Image (cartoon, rainbow, N blue to C red):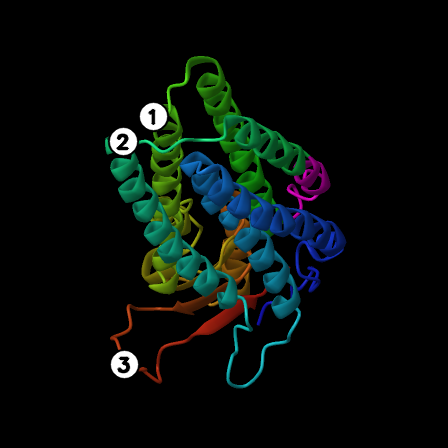
């Protein structure tokens, strides 16, 4: 067994919980204000932006929940721990966003036929206030985005919503100076179409992780070629790479080797995978011939190397 366990067990982003809580409080409070404001001013653009701000609130809540739940140790029933909670929540968030986005598009079509009177001044004030809230939230999160994928995802959500607020402000100004009420629906449609692709990516990536697919940032063919290129390695099979949660990849593989110095091969493979692919949670088995699935030959020699990175 390889004994290299030089890593931290503290969940990434733990030190940023306070800032996440502050950003969540600000964003959730303004979400309520924006929904009420959108109804009062009859601005679909505000309601559309509120739908996007809802993704900010969800992303922040998921980030906080993932940090807290990831602290729970693995047990006999959940040997990989509780990291999958983040992915389940993200998939639910994506499905909910699809429903909201399609409703916004449907409502916008109806309003194009008969635009209602819109209180552009109130729309402008609320959107400007929303932009200020987003800027404050971005300031709170910018320092932690390099340390945690959760925090980075939340930061990008807030940044995207800030751009949506700018769009609503522009729409309100156009309505104020031109009286073109259809601009409100046009802005809502633009925000909706902008959110949909990002929502699809979120759902696609979540499903890929739940199906234990190869992560998008992993080149399986390149990994296989590099493993075969190691000294005394003649073949690679049963190669699997999947994610437990975002940014936490796992690899298992069988190596066919021509030496009895298994540890040397295992150490070389472990070093290469960590250096070239940032894969630190790996299980590698060495053997002198390709084993049949479901069959263990007692005459084959095998050795397993395990390294774990729970950071």
Local crowd size for mark 2, using a 10 Å CA cut-off: few (<14), some (14–19), many (≥20)? some
- The quadrant of the image that shows the N terminus is bottom right
- Say the numbered circle drawn on residue 294: 3
Check the image and report above or below for 254 versus 136. Answer: below
Left or right position of 277 against 73: left
Numbered mark located on residue 112 in the image: 2
Q: Over which residues does the magenta segment extend?
A: 136-148
Label pair 2/1, CB-CB below 8 angstroms: yes
Check residue 72 for magenta coloring: no
- Identified at 48% across, 72% down, the residue is 303
Circles 2 and 3: CB atoms closer than 8 Å: no
Q: Position of residue 101 (x, y in %)?
A: 35, 45
Residue 124, given in percent of the width and then of the height, sits at: 56, 27
Give the left or right position of residue 121, taking residue 141 as reference: left
Residue visible at 66% across and 61% down in the picture: 11
Proximity of marks 1 and 3: CB atoms separated by less than 8 Å: no
Q: Secondary structure at mark 2?
A: helix
Label 1 or label 3, whichever lies nearer to me, is 1
Q: Residue at x 33, y 35 (%)?
A: 193
Q: Which mark is residue 114?
A: none
Judging depth in this view, the residue of 241 and 92 nearest the camera is 92
Q: Nearer the viewer, residue 10 or 174?
A: 174
Q: Earlier in the sequence, mark 1 or mark 3?
A: 1
Q: Residues within 10 Å of mark 1 (few under 14, many from 20)?
A: some
Residue that extends furthest to the top in the rendered view of this protein: 177
Q: Is residue 43 visible?
A: yes
Q: Is residue 221 visible?
A: no
Residue found at x 25% / y 75%: 292
- Dot 1: what SS? helix
Determine whether, in the image, residue 138 is placed left or right of residue 307: right
Residue ID for mark 1: 182
């Amino acid at each position: 067994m390889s004994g290299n366990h030089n890593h931290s067990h503290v969940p990434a982003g733990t030190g940023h919980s306070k800032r996440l809580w502050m950003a969540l409080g600000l964003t959730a409070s303004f979400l309520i204000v924006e929904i009420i404001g959108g109804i009062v001013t009859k601005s679909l653009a505000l309601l559309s932006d509120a739908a996007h701000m809802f993704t900010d609130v969800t992303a922040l809540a998921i980030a906080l929940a993932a940090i807290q739940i990831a602290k729970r140790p693995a047990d006999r029933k959940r040997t990989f721990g509780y990291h999958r909670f983040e992915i389940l929540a993200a998939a639910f968030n994506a499905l909910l966003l699809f429903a909201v986005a399609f409703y916004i598009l449907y409502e916008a079509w109806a309003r194009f036929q008969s635009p209602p009177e819109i209180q552009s001044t109130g729309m402008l004030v609320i959107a400007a206030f929303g932009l200020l809230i987003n800027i404050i939230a971005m300031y709170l999160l910018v320092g932690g985005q390099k340390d945690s994928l959760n925090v980075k995802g939340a930061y990008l959500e807030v940044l995207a919503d800030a751009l949506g607020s700018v769009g609503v402000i522009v729409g309100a100004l156009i309505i104020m100076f031109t009286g073109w009420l259809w601009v409100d629906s046009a802005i809502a449609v633009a925000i909706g179409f902008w959110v949909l692709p990002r929502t699809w990516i979120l759902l696609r990536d979540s499903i890929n992780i739940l199906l234990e697919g190869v992560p998008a940032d992993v080149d399986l063919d390149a990994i296989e070629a590099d493993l075969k290129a190691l000294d005394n390695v003649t073949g690679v099979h049963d190669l699997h790479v999947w994610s437990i949660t975002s940014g936490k990849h796992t690899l298992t593989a069988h190596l066919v080797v021509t030496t009895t110095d298994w540890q040397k091969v295992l150490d070389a493979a472990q070093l290469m995978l960590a250096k070239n692919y940032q894969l630190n949670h790996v299980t590698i088995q060495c053997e002198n011939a390709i084993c049949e699935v479901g069959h263990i030959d007692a005459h084959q020699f095998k050795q397993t190397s395990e390294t774990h990175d729970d950071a």
